[in-house]
Amino acid sequence: MNSVEYRETRKKEITSSCTHHFAIKVKVREVLFDDITLSPHATMSVFSCHNRKVFALIESTSTLRLGDIERLTKNAGFSPRRYAAPHGHKSYFLQRAYNIFRSVYPGRTQWTHDEESYYSLLVPYSPALVEIDGLYTTIRRFNTFSNSWQVIYEVPQRLRRMKV
């Protein structure tokens, strides 16, 4: 398989995954970064769409939580804007966070904004689709052999902290 065939196949796989897991129809224009290692069990593919939005699709063989996704996205050098809910359920994160809260405090029915924010980070979210807001100074991947992050791309000065 040559590189053109691979890129087209990868675009179709990402489109199919977004449709299947998130009920979102995306038209992938270009895969910017493919299979960036985020942990021993998670990889990320960053792609742009025809509507000028940039997304990161994070796939994992283990269960990740929303807080893990947020931390890994930032460690890789991307600023997340919003997270797509699985299967198009608009209240997925809030409903799951409330269920976790109720399992911890079965007698309470009211929760504060801080508790809502905290328990939202504990919601299972794998695979994940993250809309990217901007770039930091470097794009990094997790090196599983040395258990550290290493730079794979230095973002030019003119693109730093710009909206993607």
Image (cartoon, rainbow, N blue to C red):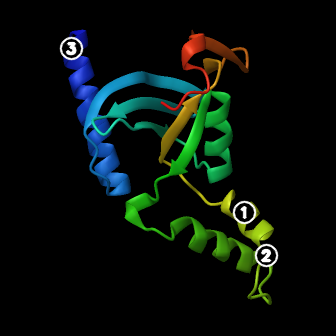
Report the side of 157 relative to 49 (left or right).
right
In this view, the residue in front, 31 or 61, is 31
Q: Please say whether residue 39 is visible from this viewpoint.
A: no
Residue carrying label 2: 112
Q: x, y percentage for residue 78?
A: 59, 31
**Residue mark closest to the camera, 3 vs 2:** 2
Residue at position x 72%, y 80% in the image: 102
- Label 1 sits on a secondary structure element that is helix
In this view, the residue in front, 47 or 57, is 47
User: Disc 2 versus disc 1: distance between alpha carbons?
Assistant: 9 Å
In this view, the residue in front, 134 or 76, is 134
Q: Which amino acid does label 2 sit on?
A: Thr
User: Disc 3 versus disc 2: distance between alpha carbons?
Assistant: 51 Å
Q: Quadrant of residue 55?
A: top left
User: Of the numbered discs in the image, which one, if any, rests on residue 117?
Assistant: 1
Residue carrying label 3: 4
Residue at position x 19%, y 17% in the image: 5
